[in-house]
Amino acid sequence: MSWRDLVRKTVGEIAEGAKREAEIVKLQAQIASLESDRDRQLLEAGKRARELHRAGRIVDTDLDVLMKRVDEAEAKLEELRARVTELRQGGPPQAAPPAPDQQQAD
């Protein structure tokens, strides 16, 4: 095999690899987009399930547990937002409690 044939072969392999990588990147972008769409739909489904659960139109023990956790998170969010408002209005700073993932289990 001459050096020209070797160069052609190498360039061809590089071009094939580049095409393959370009297709992979394109497919990964499509996957990410579809995952994002799916996540938005799941979020909307969850919001709708919560509305139906609150109205008593969905009764499910697993969903009860999840909705209780959502309610607890919302209550904590409200407390934290109120504290931010208080601080912005000149309230004194306090020691922040540890983040939930840093609290020790009893």
Image: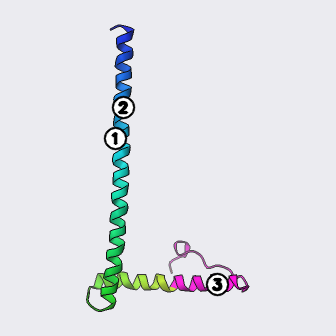
Residue 36, quarter of picture: bottom left
- The residue singled out by tag 2 in the image is 17
The residue positioned 67% from the left and 86% from the top of the image is 86
Q: Position of residue 12 (x, y in %)?
A: 34, 23
* Image disc number at residue 56: none
Q: Is residue 75 above or below residue 34?
A: below
- The residue singled out by tag 3 in the image is 85
Q: Amino acid at mark 1?
A: Glu
* Stretch in magenta: 76-105
C-alpha separation, residue under disc 3 versus residue under disc 2: 56 Å
44 or 3: nearer the viewer = 44
The mark closer to the camera, 2 or 1, is 1
Q: Amino acid at mark 3?
A: Thr
Q: Residue lying at the far top in this picture: please name it.
A: 2
Q: Amino acid at mark 2?
A: Gly
Q: Position of residue 78 (x, y in %)?
A: 54, 85
Q: Position of residue 45 (x, y in %)?
A: 31, 75
- Give the mark, 3 or 2, whose residue is nearer the N terminus: 2
Crowd tier of the residue under label 2, counting other residues whose Cα lies within 10 Å: few below 14, some 14–19, many 20 or above: few
C-alpha separation, residue under disc 2 versus residue under disc 1: 10 Å
The residue positioned 36% from the left and 81% from the top of the image is 66
Q: Is residue 19 above or below residue 61?
A: above
- The residue singled out by tag 1 in the image is 23
